[in-house]
Amino acid sequence: MPEWTFLTNHGLVLSYLASHPRITARDLADAVGITERATRKIIADLLESGYITKKREGRRNRYRVNPDLAMRHPIHSETAIGDLLQALGWKRRKRTAQPD
């Protein structure tokens, strides 16, 4: 019988992306323990829902988490996803002003 965990694969992918914004889908899949195809589907779900954004940098993507969005389940709809990520050890990076 497989062991269960407290976080879904979506939660695991989001939390890992928050701490490793330039990781490849293959490396992310290995870290989470799911297939690369499942990882890409989860990334697409997170992008579509606005929880992450993706920017191309050279041959890689850089992911950025939107920590102000609410969690999806009605029980926790007043909790920002950033609060969960911080409880899991994520440290919010300060954004530097971009020159015009």
Image (tube, helix red, strand yellow):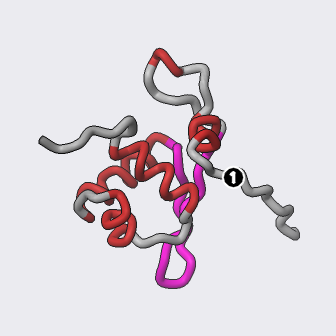
Q: Picture coordinates of residue 11 (x, y %)?
A: 42, 43
Side (left or right) of 96 relative to 2 = right
Badge 1 is on which residue?
A: 91
The boundaries of the magenta stretch are 50-67
Q: Does dot 1 land on a helix, a strand or a loop? A: loop
> Residue flagged by tag 1: what amino acid is it?
Lys
Please check the rendered image and state whether residue 54 is part of the magenta-colored stretch, yes or no: yes
Furthest-left residue in this view? 1
Instruction: Give me the residue at 47% from left, 49% from top.
Output: 14
Q: Picture coordinates of residue 88 (x, y %)?
A: 56, 44
Instruction: Give me the residue at 62% from left, 51% from top.
Output: 90
Q: Picture coordinates of residue 13 (x, y %)?
A: 41, 52
Give the vertical position of 73 relative to 62 (above or below): above
- Report the front residue among 68 and 33: 33
Instruction: Give me the residue at 86% from left, 62% from top.
Output: 97
Side (left or right) of 27 relative to 34 = right
- Report the front residue among 88 and 72: 88
Instruction: Give me the residue at 26% from left, 64% from top.
Output: 36
